[in-house]
């Protein structure tokens, strides 16, 4: 009886782990363009059955051991782009992107329908409906909703600039 219970426990644990892993993947690249500009590229593959991808954070990725959050702290988020990754499965058109910092939507709803199936679309941060540069002070969380194409491949770029106050 104990052996059956142990086996059942192991199988349930493995099933839960598989469900957690079946949530798509993200590959991130931090690219400095010059001393005043940098871009983070998030290449995303949606879940193989639902197309979903759990929210992810700039704290989860690093360059030479330095978290992306530390690299962009004090910089301004100035543009966000989304596009289907070349050679991959096209995502569902009109999927939404939200970028939050401390639960504040930096795009102020401007990420609605940002992901398209065949084209690049870009947007910018807003506050109360007005375009703004947003100074980064902590980790950014990226959330994609409405994307249901299984194994869809798309990229989200966040462009940062170092500006003087």
Image: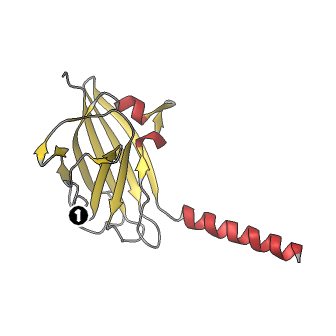
Q: Quadrant of the N terminus?
A: bottom right
Q: Picture quarter containing residue 106?
A: top left
Give the image's coloring scheme.
secondary structure
Vertical relation: 28 (above or below) 93: above
Viewer-nearest residue: 64 or 10: 10
Q: Quadrant of residue 6?
A: bottom right
Residue 87 seen in the figure:
no
Residue drawn at x 41%, y 68% is 51
Task: Determine crowd level at label 1: few under 14, some 14-19, many 20+ residues with C-alpha closer than 10 A.
Answer: some
Q: Is residue 115 above or below residue 126?
A: below
| x then y, percent, for residue 120 | 21, 55
Q: Position of residue 146 (x, y in %)?
A: 31, 68
Q: On the image, numbered disc 1 is attached to which residue? A: 118
Q: Is residue 11 visible?
A: yes
Left or right side of 123 for 34: right
Residue furthest left in the image: 130
Say whether residue 60 is left or right of residue 148. Answer: right
In this rendering, the count of numbered labels is: 1
Quadrant in the picture for the C terminus = top left
Q: Residue at x 41, y 41 (%)?
A: 58
Residue pictured at 60% horizontal, 66% vertical: 18
- Counting from the top left corner in percent of width and height, residue 21 is at 56, 61
Image coords of residue 155 (percent x, y): 33, 53
Q: Residue at x 42, y 46 (%)?
A: 57
Secondary structure of the residue carrying tag 1 is loop
Along the line of sight, which residue is nearer the eye, 155 or 58?
58
């Amino acid at each position: 009886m104990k052996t059956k219970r142990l086996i059942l426990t192991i199988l349930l644990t493995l099933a839960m782990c598989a469900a957690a892993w079946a949530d798509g993947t993200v590959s991130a690249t931090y690219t400095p363009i010059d001393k005043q500009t940098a871009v983070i590229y998030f290449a995303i593959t949606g879940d193989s059955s639902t197309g979903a991808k759990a929210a992810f954070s700039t704290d989860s990725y690093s360059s030479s051991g330095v978290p992306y959050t530390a690299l962009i702290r004090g910089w301004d988020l100035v543009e966000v782009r989304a596009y289907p990754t070349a050679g991959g499965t096209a995502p569902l058109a009109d999927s939404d992107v939200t970028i939050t910092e401390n639960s504040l939507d930096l795009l102020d709803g401007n990420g609605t329908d940002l992901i398209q199936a065949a084209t690049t679309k870009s947007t910018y941060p807003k506050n109360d409906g007005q375009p703004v540069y947003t100074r980064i002070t902590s980790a950014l969380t990226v959330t994609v909703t409405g994307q249901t194409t299984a194994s869809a491949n798309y990229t989200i770029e966040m462009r940062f600039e170092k500006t003087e106050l």
